[in-house]
Amino acid sequence: MSNLSIRRKPPRVGDAPLFRRSLIGIVLVLVAFVIVAPLVIIGVEAFSKGWQLYRDTVIHPDTLHAVMLTVLAALIAVPINTIFGIAAAWAITKFDFWGKRFLLVVIEIPFSVSPIVAGVAYLFVYGLQGLFGPWLDAHDIKILFAVPGIIIASMFVTAPFVARELIPLMQAQGRDLEEASTSLGASGWRTFFSVTLPNVKWALLYGVILCNARVMGEFGAVSVVSGNIRGQTNTLPLHIELLYHDYNATGAFAAASILALIAVFTIIAKVALERQGAGRVRKQANPAEKTS
Amino acid sequence: MKIHLENVVKTFESFQAVKGVSLDIESGELVALLGPSGSGKTTILRMVAGLEYADGGAIHFGDQDATDIPVRDRGVGFVFQHYALFPHMTVADNIAFGMKVSKVKRDKAAIDSRVTDLLRLVRLEGLGDRFPAQISGGQRQRVALARALSVDPKVLLLDEPFGALDANVRRDLRRWLREIHSELGITTLFVTHDQEEALDLADRVVILKDGQIVQQGTPQEVCRDPKSAFVMKFLGDANVIAADVRDGRAHVGGLSVEAAGVADGKGELYARPSDIDWSEQGPGIAATIARVLDRADGRRVLATTGAGEALEFDVEPERVVKAGETGFVTLRRAKVFGV
């Protein structure tokens, strides 16, 4: 029997030490160069000319305006896209209708189209020489080179985020729960708020967070439609570029540090939510002893 | 509540799932819809519930035409195959849900006491504050039943209620559902592909094939007098032996079996394994034993006839038989169908 106890366990697939170490090594090197180094540089460069200059850049009216504009865009675009995403996911996963596949493809378009192409397309739709340009001009409605344009462009780019998080989950959940709820006498709204929403809330929050991060960081599409008017239509990413082109590298890094900070907070929020979600799932999934 | 289906039709895209089904279910009856997958049984159940709309025909609940009443107002209790319990609610909240959303307002105390009653009915006292993930499959199915009963349904509908459970739990729940039905007397329709379940549980069995009813009756009627080879085969193991039919009798290997109503010519004899006897001497159909399987309740013999037909039959546990032996089979009873 004793020879059994000293028997070595056969290595699992991919468990050879050399293989394992090389994989971990590659990942660590890539993370260091691609992700960590730039973040560190932002911090270092932002404070390279001292705290005073950093402070001046951050509280400069143009920077503050850019921050406000970015937050405003997020405050409008994220809720609208959240409602859109929920509605689209609900329709696609719980109902059969003509053109369902087409809608699925349409939702994906912003992911596959370069944001700059979207921006240019908006120029042709809402610009002076564009489709609705003359009409908008005649009624004195400014969309391009103004806040509405920025918000619309941000919305286009981030339209799929919430729906993309929800659709696979809701598809996997099927329609049983909704059917059960309705057969028990619940209305459509009641079913949605009492049954559907509680079962997708973690995915929904995750989608909202991703959507928010992308709205705040969006550069390409916004750059085309905003016109980069300093202190007026400059969002934070555009402001960073502007400072950089002004040979104000320290200022650019200081502004970038704000954006990076927002991103870090977003990630922390996401991790915290996931923890909470996982804890809840564990609590529900862990059957107490003697259940049968 | 009496249910009456009249020539109900349902087509999914190009597939006709239900091809004109008419059916009467008496008040308080427990009826099984039995059929292989794709026979339309679940679709019929879902149409009775209002989860699908019929493309043609009518569904009556008592004197009322229920065909176009939406599921929400139809007053049915539906139990889903995979329970469909709300995972984010406790067992008690699941059961209370129907009462909370009801148009009939009840105060909290009334709902709580009804939940307690229902938990007692399904024998889950004390598990009210568990989540569905914390209880076993059989318990979940009982919660699903309590939830369906909470809204005082006129009709109880169950879709493969025990399909996802293991054999022992299944048998217990079956007997238990029968008791609940006797206690409440609620008109109940359930779907199953398991003939044993249907025969064990139902007052009446409706056998479906390809979207149509092929036979219905009490378990005794369908078992003793299957009207087609399909029903014969579907209800249990059956041996098939080719025979010649002449003047109302089927002949094979020196045996002759009553075959009233079967046209002269080629026919098929259907015999249950328990209806076949084995002997070393004739007369009978000559066969060679291929294998012997020992089981808890006897010995099952696999044999091949001279014509190459595979037979399965049972012999007493003490009987000495071996693979390779030859002998003769005789039929205690058999049904004959034309080919």
Image (cartoon, coloured by chain):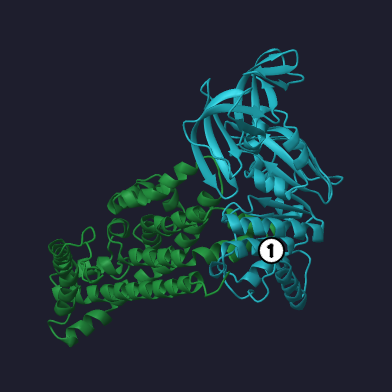
Chain colours: A green, B cyan
Q: Which quadrant holds the C terminus of chain A?
A: bottom right
Residue closest to the eye, B10 or B315: B315
In the rendering, at what x and y percent does residue B232 appear? 67, 32
Residue at x 66%, y 63% (from the top left corner): B142
Residue at (67% x, 41% y) in the render: B34
Specify whether A27 is left or right of B186.
Answer: left
In the rendered image, the vertical position of residue B252 relative to residue A57, given as above or below: above
Q: In the image shown, does A10 or A47 lie closer to the viewer?
A: A10
Pick the residue in front: A129 or B114.
B114
- Position of residue B311 in the picture relative to residue B247 (left or right): left
**On the rendered image, what quadrant is the N terminus of chain A found in?**
bottom left
The kind of residue tagged 1 is: Arg
Q: Is A1 positioned to the left or the right of B5 in the image?
A: left
| Image: A56 above or below B186 | below
In the figure, A270 relative to B74: above or below? below
Q: Is residue B41 left or right of residue A209?
A: right
Give percent across and percent down for residue B61: 81, 47
**Quadrant in which residue A251 is drawn:** bottom left
The answer to whether any part of residue B218 appears in the image is yes
The image quarter in which residue A131 lies: top left
- Element type where label 1 sits in the image: helix
Q: Which residue is mark 1?
A: B147
Q: How many labels were placed on the picture?
A: 1
Query: In the image, residue B208 lies at what x, y percent?
Result: 68, 36
Residue located at (60% from left, 66% from top): A194
Q: Chain of mark 1?
A: B
Looking at this view, is B34 or B27 the one in front?
B34
